[in-house]
Image (cartoon, rainbow, N blue to C red):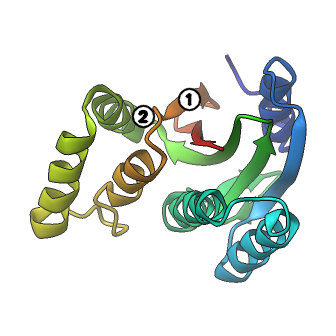
Amino acid sequence: MSYTGESKGFLNYIYDRYTHLKIKDITLLFEGQITHQVMKALTGLVEEQLDEVEDDKVLRRVYHVMVESLQNINRHAETYEHRGHPYPGMGLVLVAKNKERFQVTTGNIIENGHVEEISMFLGKLNSIDSDALDDLYKKQMREGIASPKGGAGLGFIDIRRKTGNHLDYSFVKIDDETTFFIFTSTISR
């Protein structure tokens, strides 16, 4: 799939993905710069909306996945330039639910050179059992090699461990240098 060049295209792409799924109740949809203040506001908004109707354990998992996913955007999103204006840390988040599950989807721009590495890492996480995930988490905590931006994959590992569900991800090439990375976590209710 290719990207058309308009920033609202990312939001439309994510929304279109959800129109084909059985999850129709969108709790939160946001596109913009993901700062610490924005993360706090978004997680607080979702927590407030779900506080009355959700089991505390499920609510904590949704909150945890949102924080980890938004921190990923805050730390790793490439600067997006549109019509000569740079937008650092741009990304989007969509939280949707149905009777069986919540899904937290985030999207952000990455350099094309990171696509294969991220894809292989997430594929590995999806292919191992919970004991192997725990071992990998401990290994990364002890000796994980951090990227220049500070990541060692711990957020992805932790999301996979906490949700117990496979991670869904895809990449939409924007141009010769950048790709839009879409990451979805499922939290069972």
Specify the quadrant of the image occupied by residue 100.
Answer: top right
78 sits left or right of 44 in the view: left
The local crowd at label 1, few if under 14, some if 14 to 19, many if 20 or more residues have their Cα within 10 Å, is many
Q: Is residue 183 above or below residue 149?
A: above
Give the vertical position of 118 relative to 88 (above or below): above
Question: Is disc 2 in contact with disc 1, using a CB cutoff of under 8 Å?
Answer: yes
Under circle 1, the secondary element is strand
Measuring 56% from the left and 28% from the top, which residue is drawn there? 170
Q: Say which of 52 and 114 sits in front.
A: 52
Residue 91, quarter of the rendered image: bottom right
Which kind of residue does numbered mark 1 sit on?
Phe
Q: Nearer the viewer, residue 59 or 21?
A: 59
Residue placed most toward the observer, 172 or 86? 172
Quarter of the rendering containing residue 44: bottom right
| Residue 4 visible here | no
Dot 2 amino acid type: Val
Q: Which quarter of the figure is the C terminus placed in? A: top right
Q: CA distance from mark 2 to mark 1?
A: 7 Å
| 152 with respect to 15 (left or right) | left
Return the residue at label 2. 115
What residue does disc 1 label? 171
| Residue occupying the far bottom of the picture | 37
Q: Residue at x 85, y 33 (%)?
A: 15
